[in-house]
Amino acid sequence: MLEVSRIYAGYQGNDVVHDVSFHVEEGEAVMIIGSNGAGKTTLFRTMCGLLAASSGKVRFRGEEIAGLPAQHIVRRGIGFVPAERHLFPRMTVQENLSLGAYPKRPDPETMSVVIDLFPRLAERRRQRAGTMSGGEQQMLAVGRALMSRPRLLVLDEPTTGLAPKLAHEAYEALQVLRRQGLTLLVAEQQVPLAMAFCDRGYVLENGFVRLEGSSQQLAADPRVRTAYLGVT
Amino acid sequence: MTAIILDGIVLGLQFGLLAAGLTLVYGLGGVLNLAFGEMAVITAMVVLFAMEAGVPAAPAVGLGLVAGGLLGLVFDLTILRPVYRRKHEARVLLSLLLTLGVAFMVEGLLNWRYPLKALSLQIGGGAIEILGVPMRRGSLLASAITLVALGGLFLFFRSTALGRAIRSVIEDEEGAQLVGIDPHLMLRLILILSGVLAALVAVTRSMVTPVNVKAGFGITVFALIVTVVGGLGTVSGAFLAGVILGVVSSIAASYIGTFLSLVILLMAAALTILIRPSGLLGVRE
């Protein structure tokens, strides 16, 4: 479904991501793990069109999408939930969700899927997004991305700033989406959570892919165990 | 006193309209259009020349509004191209310099070619009494048009999908892109809208006082002051600040003197920056 090959990317001519290749197949949940500053966010921003790649290819459902602006990539079916969420803070929850469906009118069926997933958003319908708690904002960011009915949902650190209980709940919601057939790509620092959820993963270090494999293979790798799972 | 306040409201509504045209472009794209007043003057000249050529007033005004929209589009397609390639402060600075250059050129050209031209739309009929104060029909019609325009803008941003899309870019440009909105397209639409508003400013103003070829600078300055006080990117802020400053200016002009009223307006703007840097209804960063 998604095939990223040999991407180099960064800011002002200094590449942060080097020669990164990975792929995501339909129905899979794939994780990119790595510590702070490993290049996960740069990689995702490049893939989603918010940042221009220095070189490399990104194919989505058979079409080349590298170099397209973010708004075109969204319309082709990649929903992106950035770590900073980028909600519209002075607009209500309802308005944020409606805009998620832009340029179409919000589809009531999709809206009810989102509301079933996050009943809290229905309670807060008229509240301004900027006044909600971090956990609620995260729900809204995911909900807004779902409103465009993406085929692939990309989440950058969905658990940033969330208490452990909320982080678990976030992954439970993602599990529901997976069962509904959505393909997922997640960047995560909280490796144990992501590992329990994803089929496969890639380990990003200093902008290079160091390891790849199924979650079981990665969990068994001594380097991953010491660096990311806290096992000594 | 009632008369002074009513005059202030008439003036204030005009202030609100000018500021709306400037503040939306700035709030949305970080582009400061110092040629806004000249856009208004050009459209005033379009209306004037159309009427001199025998076109009746109403269609001539229509032509002026179309010319305003076209001017906005031309700005977007020409001098603002290099501006869009910059970001943040560099963008504000470059837009300020380029549009100021355009303003000087337009003013110079108009002054040279048509030094004595002025648009003055005469609204016939006697004065109408409001709260015991006789008001000129021109002032009332101008205020009514302005109110309708501001109300229309407010509703457009509040309740239409396109209006919401434009607001989303003001709120968070990257967030807007992530829901599939093209920020550059929205900016182009806003520039066209801003041009139409400039034309509306020229037309309504000419119902109250003649708009001559030197009026542009004053319009830009007032638009800037009201924008600073009202906050960036908000129509309701522009409206509120416009009315407040209009009343303040009218009171100052009649009790202290016309010259000092501008000083008092500038002080009000400076005070707002000190107390509430984001303006009355602006976004707090």
Image (cartoon, rainbow, N blue to C red):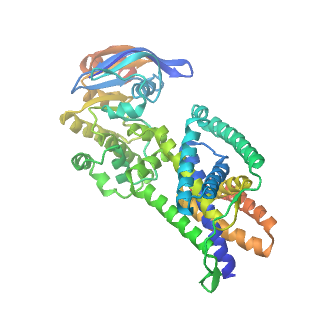
Residue at left 66%, top 68%?
B208
Q: Name the one closer to the observer, B169 or B36.
A: B36
Quadrant of the snapshot with the N terminus of chain A:
top left
Quadrant in the picture for residue A81: top left
* Image height of B171 relative to A58, above or below: below
Estimate the x, y position of residue B193 in percent, counting from the top left: 52, 50
Q: Residue furthest bottom?
A: B132
Q: Residue at x 63, y 62 (%)?
A: B15
Q: In this picture, is B203 found above or below A69?
A: below
**Where does the C terminus of chain A fall, quadrant-wise?**
top left
- The residue closer to the viewer here, B91 or A36, is B91
Out of A103 and A43, give the one closest to the viewer.
Answer: A103
Residue A21 as seen in the image, left or right of residue A116: right
Judge whether residue B233 can be spotted in this image: no
Q: Is residue A16 visible?
A: yes
Q: Quadrant of residue A226?
A: top left
> Residue B81: where, in percent of width, then height?
58, 33
Q: Position of residue A21 (x, y in %)?
A: 36, 15
Q: Residue at x 24, y 19 (%)?
A: A216
Name the residue rendered at 30%, 40% in the picture. Answer: A148
The residue positioned farthest toward the front in the image shown: B54
